[in-house]
Amino acid sequence: MDYIDDLINIAIKEDIGDGDHTSLSCIPQNAQGKAHLLVKEDCVIAGVELAERIFKRIDPNLLFQKKINDGELVNVGDIIFTIEGTSQSILQAERLVLNFMQRMSGIASNTNYYAKILDGLDTKILDTRKTTPGLREIEKWAVKIGGGLNHRMGLYDMIMIKDNHVDYAGGIAAAINSTHEYLKNNNKQLKIEVEARNLTEVKEILAEGKVHRIMLDNFSFEEMRTAVKLIDGKYETEASGGITSETIREYAECGVDYISVGALTHQINSVDLSLKAI
C-alpha cells in the first residue's frame, strides 16, 4: 500500500498546496464539526477504506465512523460514514475523498453490472491496463470491489505477447522461445500469455506450448467455440477485443475462462456523492 500513501500525498499537494486559505481565513482554528457522506444515486460503494486513510493523513485526530463497507450496494439517501473533528481538517479532506470515492464507486458499479450478466457461469471478468495514468492501483482496487479480477498490474508482473510482439520477434515460436530465454537469463518467474488473432495462430501456439494462457482476440462466437475446443483445457483462455455488455454473456458461454473488458475502467461515470455538514 506504499503507492497508495504516495498517491494521497500527491493529491494533497495538488489540492492544498501551501494551505486551504478559504477555511483558514473564515473558520476558527479550534472550531469543531461533523459531517457524513451522503449517497445521491444507487451504486456499489467503493473507496471507504481509502477515505479513512485520507482523513487520517490530513488529521490523525479526526474521528471516522464507518456505516457501510466497500462493495455494498447502496441507495439514494444512505449514509456511508461520519467524520468528526476540526472543521478545517474536514474541509481540507472533503474534495480529495469525494474525487477518489466518486470514481472508484463508478468503476465498482460498472464492474458489478458486467459481472451480474455472467451470473451462473464460471467465466471471470478481468480489467486491463486502460486506466488513468497514476490512478491504476485505485482503479483496479475498485474493479475487485465490484466483483471483477485484476489482470496484470503493468508491464512488469506478467508476460503478454501480443500481435506487435509476435510480428517484431519473427513469429509466435520465436517470441515464445526468446521469452523463455529472457526469463531464464534474468532469473524471473512470470506467467506467459500469448495473443492469437485467428485459429491458425491458436494452432501455432498449441504446437509450441510453454505458455499459461491464450488470449483470443476479436474472435467471432463460432471461432471462439472452436478455439476453446482446440485448447481443450491445456491452457487458460481469455476472450478480448470489443466485447460489450450485449455480447459478453454469449462469449462467456463459449467456455472461456476469462473475458477482459477495458470499459470497466475507461468508460465509466463517476457516482454522485456528497459530504454534508450535520
Image (tube, rainbow, N blue to C red):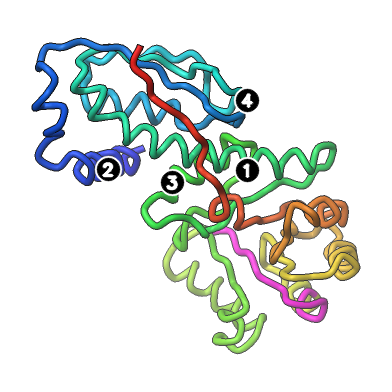
Residue on which disc 2 sits: 11
Label 1 with label 4: CB-CB less than 8 Å? no
Viewer-nearest of discs 4 and 3: 4
Q: Residue at x 78, y 77 (%)?
A: 198
Q: Amino acid at mark 1?
A: Asn
- The circle drawn on residue 137 is 3
Question: Tag 1's secondary structure?
Answer: helix
Q: Residue at x 60, y 74 (%)?
A: 162
Q: How far is disc 2 from disc 4 in space, using C-alphas?
A: 27 Å
> In this orientation, which residue lies closer to the viewer: 172 or 198?
198
Q: Give whichever of 72, 184 is nearer the camera.
A: 72
Mark 1 and mark 2: Cα distance apart in space? 24 Å
- Judge from the rendering whether residue 116 lies leftward or rightward of residue 226; answer left or right: left
Kind of residue sitting beneath label 2:
Ala
Circles 1, 3 touching at the beta carbon (< 8 Å): no
Alpha-carbon distance for marks 1 and 4? Answer: 12 Å
Tell me the element at label 4: strand
The image quadrant of residue 44 is top right
Q: Residue at x 78, y 72 (%)?
A: 206
Magenta range? 190-202
Residue on which the image places disc 4: 73
Residue pointed to by mark 1: 110
